[in-house]
RNA sequence: GCGGGCGUAGCUCAGUGGUAGAGCGUCACGUUGCCAACGUGAAUGUCGUGAGUUCAAAUCUCAUCGCCCGCUCCA
C-alpha cells in the first residue's frame, strides 16, 4: 500500500496485461506513439462514454458533434493556428541549448521582457535576423546562435492524389474549430437556445517539440472538448459552473481528491484568445511527482466566432492567391460584426450578438492514464503481493468474470450459461482454466469488479458466489437474482 | 536538441570475448472443493537495428532507433 507507484510499474503492467503497447514495436517503435490493446481500448472507450454521458446525454443544454480531422485551410488561418502555431527556435552554438527566439533577451539589462505569445511567422523571421546582441539563457554567451529554425506545430499533409492538383492541408490541432465551423449548422437544425454547448470527442495532432512520459504527451492524441456558448456577462458564472462540473466528474469516477487540484493561469500565461483559464491537474508519478494538466477550462470570449466571420470574408483573397495561405491577411472586422453570419438572435431581447464561449478541453489519453495510475494498488495477502486496479465500475474494461470452481460435475456448463446470459448486459469474461485463486488474481490485475463462481452448492440450490475485487469478500446470490444484483452494484 | 541512465523470453532481470540463462507468466495433460496450489511436460529470443574490430561479439568500437530521468519546449 505504502509503495510509491512509479511510471515504470504502470508501463510494465500496461504491456503485460494488454492495455497499451508501443506503436510499431516490431520495427523498433515510433517515438511517442502508442496503441491501445484489448483491455486498453475498453478502458479508453469507457472514459469517452463516461464523458459523453455526463457532458452530453445527462444535460438538456448540450448537443454532440463529430467533425472531420481535415478541414478547409482557411479554418486555421482564421483561428490563428496557421500563423501562430509556429515557433522560431535558435540554438546556442556554445552550449547547444535551444530557446524560442521570442524568449531571448537582449544583452542590455533594461529589458522588461513581457510574456510573448506565438507571433506570426513572417514577422518573427524578420525580427529574428539579428540575434547578435541576444543572450543565451543557459550559458550567458552573447550572439552565438544558429539560424532560427521554424517549428510548425501543425502536421502537414496533402489532399488530392494528383500531385499537380493537390493542396496542402493540416491535421487539426484541436477539435474546437470544427465546432465553431458548425455553429451555424447546429443553430439552424436543433432549436438550441443560448446558453447551450456543443461537444465533440476526437483525435487531434500537434508536432510538439518534445513529448513526455508514456502516453501523457503524444503528438497524436484524443480530446474531449465542449464549447459552451453563452451571453457576454454570464461568461464568468458559466466558467465557474464548468470548472466545478469538470472537477467533480473526475472525482465521481474515482480519482482520489488529494491527487487532483486546480491551477489558475496567470494573466501573462493566457493564450491569445483567452480571458481566463484554469487547469485541472493530477499528481502523476513522473519524475518529481509533479502536478500535470488533465484538462483546461478556458474562457475563449467571442474571439473564435468573430475570427471566422473575418475568415469567411477573406475567402476570395485565398482563391486569388492560388489557394495559398501565405501572404494573405484576414480582412478587417466589419463594424456590425455582431449581426454577422455567425451571430445569434436572442428572441427575448430581439437582439443579435456573438456569444462568449467557455471551453472545457480534456485529454482522453492522459485521463485514461490518470485513472490507471490512480486505480493501481499493491497489497499484501498471506505473504503474497496482490496487484490490482481499483477501477470505478463504469471504467473497468471487464465488469464480470464467470468461473466454474472446478472443471467437472457440470459446473462449466452452468457457468457458461450464466456467462452467455450476462454478456448481453455487461462486458464479461469466462475462464475455467487452472485454480480458481489464480483466476481471481488475474481479474484483479485487469480491474474486473466482480467474479462469479459456480460451485458444488450451485447444483443443489441454484446460488453462486459473487466475489468483490476490492475486499475479496464473497456473497451467495441466487442465479435468478444475479442480474439485478450486479446491475445494482455496477450502477448501470 | 543537450546531459545522464537504459535496451537480453510476454514481464522483471542475471550474463564483460568462447554452447542463450533464471524467476514469474503462458500453453498442454493430470490433479482440484474459494484466493497467484501441486505434479509432469512444452513453447517462446533478429540479445533494439546496422556496420566495424576479432579465429570468435549479448559482451569491445561507431552509427542509428526506442524508453526513462533532468534541461529546453509545451497554441
Image (spheres, coloured by chain):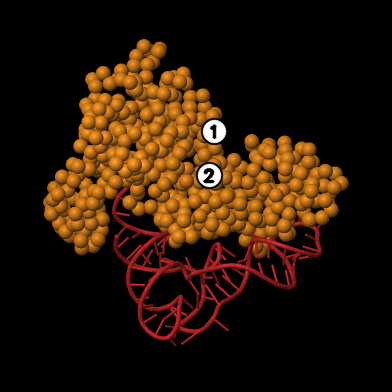
The chain that appears orange in the image is A
Q: Is residue A401 above or below residue A276?
A: below
Quarter of the picture holding the C terminus of chain A: top right
Q: Residue at x 50, y 57 (%)?
A: A11
Q: Residue at x 50, y 46 (%)?
A: A368
Left or right of A469 on screen, residue B47: left
**Residue A274 visible within the image:** no
Mark 1, secondary structure of its residue:
helix
The chain that appears red in the image is B
Chain to which mark 2 belongs? A
Q: Residue most toward the right?
A: A460
Tell which of A367 and A434 is nearer to you: A434
Mark 1–mark 2 Cα distance, whole angstroms, equals: 14 Å
Q: Position of residue A471 (x, y in %)?
A: 67, 50
Tell which of A131 and A431 is nearer to you: A431
Name the residue beneath numbered marker 2. Answer: A44
Mark 2, secondary structure of its residue:
helix
Mark 1 touches mark 2? (CB < 8 Å): no
Q: Position of residue A400 (x, y in %)?
A: 67, 45
Quarter of the picture holding the N terminus of chain A: bottom right
The answer to whether tags 1 and 2 share a subunit is: yes
Residue A198 sits in quarter: top left
Q: Position of residue A195 (x, y in %)?
A: 43, 23
Residue A53 badge: 1
Chain-order first, disc 1 or disc 2: 2
Chain to which mark 1 belongs? A
Residue A406 sits in quarter: bottom right
User: Comparing marks 1 and 2, which lies closer to the viewer?
Assistant: 2
Q: Residue at x 69, y 51 (%)?
A: A472
Amino acid at each position: 500500500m505504502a509503495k510509491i507507484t512509479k511510471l515504470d510499474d504502470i508501463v510494465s503492467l500496461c504491456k503485460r496485461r494488454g492495455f497499451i503497447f508501443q506503436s510499431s514495436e516490431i520495427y523498433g517503435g515510433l517515438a511517442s506513439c502508442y496503441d491501445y490493446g484489448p483491455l486498453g481500448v475498453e478502458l479508453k472507450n469507457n472514459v469517452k462514454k463516461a464523458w459523453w454521458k455526463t457532458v452530453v446525454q445527462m444535460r438538456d443544454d448540450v448537443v454532440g458533434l463529430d467533425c472531420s480531422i481535415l478541414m478547409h485551410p482557411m479554418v486555421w488561418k482564421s483561428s490563428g493556428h496557421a500563423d501562430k502555431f509556429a515557433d522560431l527556435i535558435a540554438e546556442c552554438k556554445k552550449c547547444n541549448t535551444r530557446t524560442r527566439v521570442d524568449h531571448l533577451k537582449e544583452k542590455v539589462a533594461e529589458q522588461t521582457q513581457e510574456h510573448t505569445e506565438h507571433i506570426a511567422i513572417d514577422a518573427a523571421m524578420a525580427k529574428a535576423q539579428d540575434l547578435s546582441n541576444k543572450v543565451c539563457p543557459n550559458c550567458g554567451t552573447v550572439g552565438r546562435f544558429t539560424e532560427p529554425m521554424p517549428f510548425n506545430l501543425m502536421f502537414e499533409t496533402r489532399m488530392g492524389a494528383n500531385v499537380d492538383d493537390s493542396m496542402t492541408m493540416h491535421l487539426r490541432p484541436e477539435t474546437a474549430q470544427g465546432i465553431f465551423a458548425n455553429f451555424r449548422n447546429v443553430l439552424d437544425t436543433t432549436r438550441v437556445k443560448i446558453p447551450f454547448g456543443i461537444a465533440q470527442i476526437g483525435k487531434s495532432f500537434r508536432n510538439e517539440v518534445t513529448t513526455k512520459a508514456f502516453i501523457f504527451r503524444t503528438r497524436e492524441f484524443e480530446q474531449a472538448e465542449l464549447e459552451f456558448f453563452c451571453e457576454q456577462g454570464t461568461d464568468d458564472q458559466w466558467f465557474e459552473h464548468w470548472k466545478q462540473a469538470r472537477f467533480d466528474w473526475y472525482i465521481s469516477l474515482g480519482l482520489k481528491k488529494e491527487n487532483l487540484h486546480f491551477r489558475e493561469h496567470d494573466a501573462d500565461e493566457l493564450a491569445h484568445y483567452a480571458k481566463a483559464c484554469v487547469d485541472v491537474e493530477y499528481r502523476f508519478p513522473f519524475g518529481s511527482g509533479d502536478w500535470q494538466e488533465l484538462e483546461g477550462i478556458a474562457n475563449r470570449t467571442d474571439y473564435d466566432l468573430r475570427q471566422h466571420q473575418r475568415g469567411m470574408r477573406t475567402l476570395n483573397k485565398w482563391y486569388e492567391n492560388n489557394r495559398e495561405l501565405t501572404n494573405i491577411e484576414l480582412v478587417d472586422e466589419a463594424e456590425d460584426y455582431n449581426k454577422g453570419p455567425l451571430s445569434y438572435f436572442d428572441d427575448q431581447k430581439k437582439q443579435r450578438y456573438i456569444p462568449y464561449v467557455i471551453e472545457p478541453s480534456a485529454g482522453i489519453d492522459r485521463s485514461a492514464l490518470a485513472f490507471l495510475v490512480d486505480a493501481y494498488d499493491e497489497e499484501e495477502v498471506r505473504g503474497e503481493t496482490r496487484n490490482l486496479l481499483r477501477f470505478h465500475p463504469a471504467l473497468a474494461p471487464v465488469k464480470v468474470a464467470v468461473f466454474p470452481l472446478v472443471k467437472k460435475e457440470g459446473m462449466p456448463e452452468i457457468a457458461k450459461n450464466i456467462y452467455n446470459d450476462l454478456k448481453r448486459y455487461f462486458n464479461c469474461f469466462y475462464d475455467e482454466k487452472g485454480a480458481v485463486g489464480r483466476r481471481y488474481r488475474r481479474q484483479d490485475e485487469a480491474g474486473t469488479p466482480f467474479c462469479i463462481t459456480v460451485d458444488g452448492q450451485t447444483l443443489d440450490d441454484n446460488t453462486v458466489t459473487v466475489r468483490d475485487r476490492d475486499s475479496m469478500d464473497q456473497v451467495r446470490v441466487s442465479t435468478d437474482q444475479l442480474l439485478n444484483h450486479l446491475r445494482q452494484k455496477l450502477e448501470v
